[in-house]
């Protein structure tokens, strides 16, 4: 095993593409269920784990992180307004 910059142990081989699609779908569902901040945190951890080992999968999680980020900002704004 290799320890990457995120501090997690990762296998030398990248996960199969079907697994990253499943994880992305799960993170989108988590955000839609009212947990966009947690979804962003987990997507960020996936980005850190994949950054050097699998650029293709890293791009997918990075794109997801950028799509979810506005949801966190909107959620925090709503909380400040007491909504």
Image (cartoon, rainbow, N blue to C red):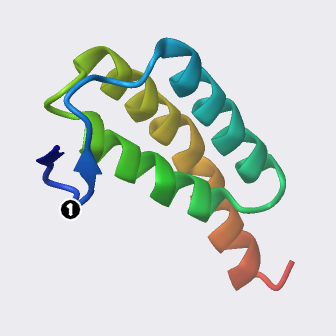
Residue 77 x %, y %: 66, 71
27 up-or-down from 16: above or below: below
Residue 23 x %, y %: 59, 35
In the rendered structure, the answer to whether residue 25 lies left or right of residue 4 reads right
Q: Residue at x 73, y 80 (%)?
A: 79
Give the tally of numbered discs.
1
Q: Residue at x 27, y 34 (%)?
A: 50
Q: Residue furthest front?
A: 1
Q: Which residue is labeled 1 in the image?
A: 7
Q: Residue at x 26, y 36 (%)?
A: 11
Query: What is the quadrant of the N terminus in the image?
Result: top left
Q: Residue at x 37, y 21 (%)?
A: 57
Task: Give the quadrant of residue 61.
Answer: top left
83 up-or-down from 62: above or below: below
Secondary structure state at the residue bearing disc 1: loop
Residue 82 x %, y %: 82, 85
In the rendered structure, the answer to whether residue 15 lies left or right of residue 69 reads left
8 up-or-down from 77: above or below: above
Query: What is the quadrant of the C terminus in the image?
Result: bottom right
């Amino acid at each position: 095993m290799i320890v990457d910059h995120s501090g997690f142990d990762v296998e030398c081989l990248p996960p199969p593409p079907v697994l990253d699609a499943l994880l992305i779908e799960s993170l989108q569902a988590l955000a839609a269920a009212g947990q966009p901040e947690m979804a962003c945190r987990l997507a960020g951890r996936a980005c850190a784990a994949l950054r050097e080992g699998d650029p293709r999968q890293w791009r997918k999680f990075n794109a997801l992180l950028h799509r979810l980020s506005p949801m966190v900002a909107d959620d925090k704004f709503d909380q400040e307004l007491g909504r």
